[in-house]
Amino acid sequence: MTDVRVAGVGLTPFGSHPERTGRDLFGEAALRAFEDADVDRADVEELNYGNFMGALAEHQGHQAPLMAEAAGVRCPATRYESACASAGVAVREAVRTVAAGDADVVLAGGMERMTNLPTDEVTEGLAIAADDLFEVRAGVTFPGAYALMANAYFDAYGGSREDLAHVASKNHENAVPNEYAQYRKEVSVAEAMDAPPVAEPLHLYDACPITDGASALVLVSGEYAERHDLDAPVAVTGTGQGTDRMALGDREHLARTPAAADAADAAYADAGIEAADVDLAEVHDCFTIAEVLALESLGLFEHGEGITAAREGVTTADGDLPVNLSGGLKAKGHPVGATGGSQIAELTRLLRGDHPNSDRVPDAAVGVAHNAGGTVASAVVHVLEVAE
Amino acid sequence: MSDDGADPADDAVPADRDYADWLDALADGDGFALVCSDGHGSLPPRRVCPECGAADLSREPLDETGTVETYSVVHVPSPRFADDAPYATAVVEFGPTRLTGIVRDGDRGSDATPDVEIGDSVAVDVGERATDGERLVVFRPAGES
Ligand SMILES: [Zn+2]
């Protein structure tokens, strides 16, 4: 297995950019990634691009060649779709390609355009990540599905809306210094508690915003990095993926996400680490309850114990295990098809020391990224380590 | 066009036929799951059991009443449910499988968020969306008819 290095990362500011085309968003992220990497575009051997609802949002299918143009690369280009884990699977295949020695340089990432659609159409668009026949036609929305998981969690293990409000408040606080974040404002626990309901028990501040944005990573082999004298201190040392039954009601347990546990087991084994080695995590908090479920599936907390992690300060910036120092999907934003790439970009910056929140984790050496699709019918986990 | 396929222009042949047939059965009080020899239940169409791959699936009736395993009151609906919100959606166990649907209070005859709790006993039926009349799975408190 070849060493896989993150040579460069690029993000657009996450937010509301209804006037910008998808190609412009991804073009910007790729440009920044190449600037950061100091890698020649002509060396790129593959483009792996994640996108979920481009056909709905901008009537554009077949996006990969378009994004290769936007990035200024000419190489085999493929679009990956796995709902909110679209970029996660795109990055994973890039990692596997480089690790297998099939390419020295792969550009990976994703893009999503959402705010140009009316909110109800976004709600409808996101719902297609669930089972159309047996969930969507039965009234399940995306927030509704996570609300079903939240109530099942409360019933199985206890916990309260206030515990979830602490997750929201923590992630908003983390986003304040992050120049790429959509919401750089603090939200108090009381404000989160008082917000209007979306799908009970989840209220407005339990949910991630609707976001436009793109992410791009230049991944290279260790050999290539050495040959070109690249400054690429962070390595992707583990990758894993898991799949579960599509419909929430078909899962063994309504308050657990075993696809993420499978992905984590595989990624940890790939990296040769254990959960106890993890210093910080970027997890898929599309809803506050999702962060709780992620922490438990990643083996960072026992089942039933993740719910109080934010409230007790374990996962806050000053805690033993900071989670979502970027602000998470919750406050940084969630351009669906870009999110998995942005998590790796943020972890890389945090570990390299050039993220505004790097000083909260000066000694961190091992980071984990958790990206989930739908109600975690798909999950991708990556392990990043400081290699030098 | 070959004559062994359905003509999409023919109104008598529903789109998503297996789902439509399953809803018809549910509406007739003959709701069923497909069950393999290991007891895994699933909903049609299935060629094999999604849990174990067994191809030998039998049509087994759902339990008369089910137990609410989780629920949520949805306030922000998709456009297809615009006039239905707020409504309570629930996941209910009916023996060989779980079903997802909307809880309705039969007495009130409306979607006005009924008092639903985990552990409640409900019966399953087919109702209509307020928004556009499309059929959907509904649950009613057990004992009502
Ligand atoms: Zn089976």
Image (cartoon, rainbow, N blue to C red):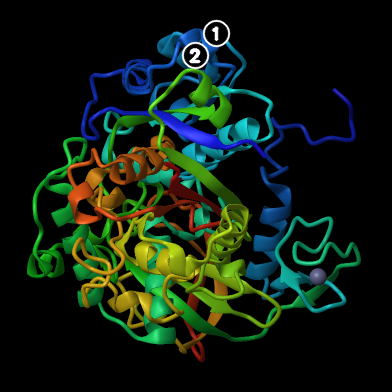
A177 with respect to B113 (left or right): left
Residue B122 got which mark?
none
| Image mark 2: chain | A
Q: Which residue is disc 1 drawn over? A: A74
- Image quarter where the N terminus of chain A lies is top right
Residue in the image at 58% along x and 70% along y: B99
Looking at mark 1, is its residue's CB closer than 8 Å to ligand 1? no
**Tag 2: amino acid:** Ala
Front residue of A262/A187: it is A262
Q: Earlier in the sequence, mark 2 or mark 1?
A: 2
A276 lies above or below A173: below
**Tag 1: amino acid:** Arg
Q: Which residue is disc 2 drawn over? A: A68
Q: Are marks 2 and 1 in contact (CB under 8 Å)?
A: yes
Q: Position of residue A52 (x, y in %)?
A: 47, 35
Q: Position of residue A61 (x, y in %)?
A: 52, 21
A26 with respect to B90 (left or right): left
State whether residue A173 appears in this view: yes
Looking at mark 2, is its residue's CB closer than 8 Å to ligand 1? no
B22 with respect to A18 (left or right): right
Which quarter of the figure has residue A77? top right
Front residue of A214/B79: it is A214
Q: Quadrant of ligand 1?
A: bottom right
A202 lies above or below B61: above
State whether residue A197 appears in this view: no
Q: CA distance from mark 2 to mark 1?
A: 6 Å
Q: Position of residue A202 (x, y in %)?
A: 28, 66
Residue in the image at 51% along x and 19% along y: A63
| Image mark 1: chain | A
Residue in the image at 33% along x and 46% along y: A351
A23 lies above or below B17: above
